Image (cartoon, rainbow, N blue to C red):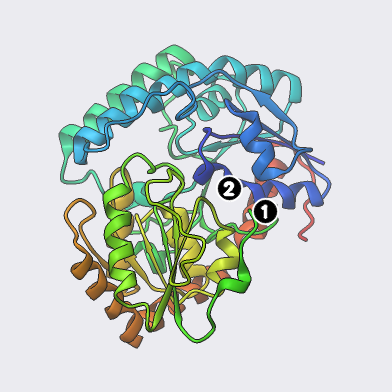
Amino acid sequence: MSGFLFVVPPLVGHVNPAVGVAARLAARGHRVAWACPDPALVRRLAGEDAEVFACAGPVPGADGAVRPPDLRGAEALKFLWEWYLVPLADAMAAGVRTAVERFRPDVVVADQQAFAGALVAERLGLPWATSATTSAEFTGAYDGMPKVAEWLRQRLAELRARIGDPAGTADPRYSPHLLLVFSTPELIGPQAPLGQRIHYVGPSLDDRPGGPGFPWDRLDPGRAKVLVTLGTANADAGGRFLAECRTALRERADRVQSVLVDPGATLPADPADKDVLVLRSVPQLPLLERMDAVVCHAGHNTVCEALWHGVPLVVAPIRDDQPVVAAQVVDAGAGVRVRFGRVTAPRLGAALDTVLQDRAYRAAAMRVRTAFRAAGGARAAATHLERLAVGSSGGTTESR
């Protein structure tokens, strides 16, 4: 039996992929624990019995701070690093170290944006794996921006000097021991890097607790179904876009019924509306089983969950890794891209008509679906982690 400590930021999209992996490891008899600044979030997603070590660190929205919604490109990346990722690592480091000392894991599983997990493990001489919940870092996104890439390297070097091993050389985003990527080359594209330590396991969707309730009886079997969602972290930026979506969808109500997720309550909800169901939250995975298309922000988790079900997309990236993921969707032939900040209802409607009516988009989404399901998901990720633990301690593995 081995011990695995999952170090995650307090972000739903980064905790969710690890949930199924942790559940698989626990089912195989291993010890599993978490380190996160928001223990309640982990327990909500992984189950109330999850063992969670609290860490200090900024929790998005908890202090009322909101990232300026108009930030894009390099400015948004700089803001993300300076005002969130680096302070998060500095704040989490002491708590992660305490978690390691108390839990005594054989392997640390560090989310790619939870730098403290990797740097503390390196400093303490523990093997660590990277949980890559977005594949954007593997597409050469900074190849044409050498100044940006150098700026990122400098920030990481300064962070290592504060909380890591000053003699260490590994980039905390890419473990030299094991890199688990929750996607496949069929979506990432030909630039997906290869190597013995790199494993493309596809989406990890197993073993998640059930989501919120849903009025299933309101779904009309006679119309195509469309889900509109901007994820959990974009409520501050989505009002105009959701309103344009609603207009476009109402114009197609004779043939399309839609579910529009509005966590920020920016639109008035009408319980009597049978054409556009506006809800604060939905059980996304079971809902996707009934969808014919998804309109979203190109968040990695939403994209992968849609393609897991073979559902084509209209993607409107906002910031961070989303433009890269949107490009992956378009290059794979599984969707159409629109401009988040400027798109109008007619343009959205035309894009939606395209993915609903042109069978090539559904066929491309099904090709990615096949690759995702063959990659192994949580089961494969758990097996790779077991092998890493065996290599460091000399145990045995058992797949389940």
Q: Residue at x 20, y 33 (%)?
A: 75
**29 relative position to 164: left or right:** right
Give coordinates of residue 124: x percent, y percent. Answer: 60, 20
Query: As rendered, which of 184 and 204 lies closer to the eye?
Result: 204
Where is residue 77 drawn, in percent x and y? 27, 35
| Amino acid at dot 2 | Asn
Q: CA distance from mark 1 to mark 2?
A: 8 Å
Q: Residue at x 66, y 52 (%)?
A: 20
**Dot 1 and dot 2 residues touching (CB under 8 Å):** yes
Going from the N terminus, do you reach mark 1 or mark 2 first?
2
Mark on residue 16?
Answer: 2
Tag 1, which secondary structure?
Answer: loop
**Residue situated in front as seen by the camera: 174 or 169:** 174
Q: In the figure, residue 41 lies in which quadrant? A: top right
Closer-to-camera residue (263/304): 263
> Can you see residue 140?
no
Q: Amino acid at mark 1?
A: Arg
The residue singled out by tag 1 in the image is 208
Instruction: Work out whether 297 lies above or below 13.
Output: below
Q: Secondary structure at mark 2?
A: helix
Q: Residue 395, how many percent across, how many down? A: 79, 44
Above or below 9: residue 133: below
Q: Is residue 48 left or right of residue 128?
A: right
Q: Is residue 311 left or right of residue 207?
A: left
Q: Is residue 301 visible?
A: yes
Residue situated furthest front in the rendering: 272
Q: Quadrant of the N terminus?
A: top right
Q: Is residue 87 left or right of residue 40?
A: left
Residue 37 x/y as whole percent: 57, 25
